[in-house]
Amino acid sequence: MTPSPRLLLTIDYESWFAPSRRYDFLSSQDRRILDDGFVYDAIDPLLEKLSPVKTSVYLVGEFVDWYPDLPQKIAQAGHEVGFHCQVHRPLNTVADIKDDLEKSREWRAKYHVTGFRAPMINTIEEVYPLLEQNGFCYSSSLYAPAGTLIQKGKIWEVPVSTLPLLGHPKHILAPRRMNIPLVLGGEFPYGSSMMSGLFRPVVFKIIERQLKAGFSPVIFLHPYEIISPDNWPARFRRDLLANPLLYPFTLNKSDFLRDIVKAFPISTVAEYVKESLQ
């Protein structure tokens, strides 16, 4: 069954410092101190802004250790609780993925988590058997044109959306992340919040046209792009100086969120996959 077209709006729920790699190997307690309460303080105002629609919220698992009621808040508001790794860092080895899945097993079972989003939309083909073994139904961890739905064993891959300018790619295998080869290959990764930061009107128009063409685009935003942290983005200055490409992630996109929520039909990725398989 082909579901009716809708925007698959997703939130990668991570701390304000996540775009930087400088903090990946701090202890969880040190990251909690660095976060300074942001991930908990942001959830209620974010859920209020999302209240007209239901979305997929991919949660970094260590936040559940910090704030055990965080996933409950998301679920009670009617949103899908997904998994965005246990500790936000590149997951490029089987050993690291297994470790994250084991450490998150208890809370994922409690909240019936069936959706996975790899950090930085960057994973490996070996992730899919591991997801299958751990009770997942789908992943959204590649970039590919809207409307792409790929079966990987018993796992369905629902990629973050690109606009193919030079024809549909023939082979879609992990890793398929936002990088120079992807762009030079003729794909505009409008599903990334980097693009909605830099080209907001363009991204809005692309979503509108893709929906009219019968596709269901997948896009993502982050909480710090909607609910600005204190002293933002000054507290991120060192990281911006080291990597200016992080700048679009510091832009506030609450107006963009308001506009797409008003303009387009929206549902969770889990609901879209369920309807697709009927």
Image: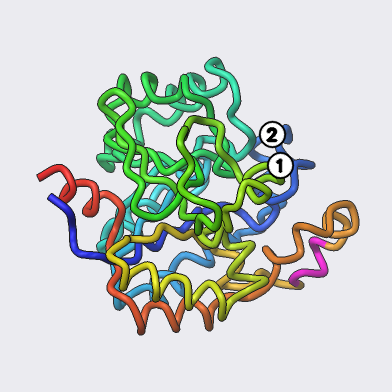
Alpha-carbon span between mark 1 and mark 2: 5 Å
Main SS class of the magenta portion in the image: helix
Q: Is 46 situated above or below 25?
A: below
Residue extending farthest to the top is 95
Q: Is residue 244 visible?
A: yes
Residue at screen point 51% across, 35% down: 86
Q: Which residue lies at the image location 58% right of the left edge and 76% below the top edge? A: 200
Does residue 77 show up? no
Look at the image and give the residue range highlighted in magenta: 232-236
Q: Amino acid at mark 2?
A: Ser
Whole-percent x, y for residue 133 in the image: 31, 19
Placement of the C terminus among the 4 image quadrants? top left
- As drawn, 231 above or below 111: below
Q: How many marks?
A: 2
Q: Residue at x 41, y 47 (%)?
A: 68
Q: Nearer the viewer, residue 168 or 10?
A: 168
| Amino acid at pointer 1 | Asp
Q: Is residue 266 magenta?
A: no
Residue 207 x, y percent position in the rendering: 43, 70
Crowding at dot 1, Cα within 10 Å, few <14 / some 14-19 / many 20+, comes out as few
Q: Which mark is residue 170?
A: none
Label 2: which residue? 27
Label 2: few (<14), some (14–19) or many (≥20) C-alpha neighbours in 10 Å: few
Which secondary structure, mark 1? helix
Determine which quarter of the picture holds residue 252.
bottom right
Q: Is residue 166 above or below residue 261?
A: above
Instruction: Decide if residue 142 is on the left or right side of residue 35.
Output: left
Q: Can you say whether 4 is above or below 119 in the image?
A: below
Between residues 58 and 103, which one lies in front from this camera angle?
58
Q: Quadrant of residue 8?
A: bottom left
Circle 1 sits on which residue? 30
Give the residue drawn at x 38%, y 38%.
139
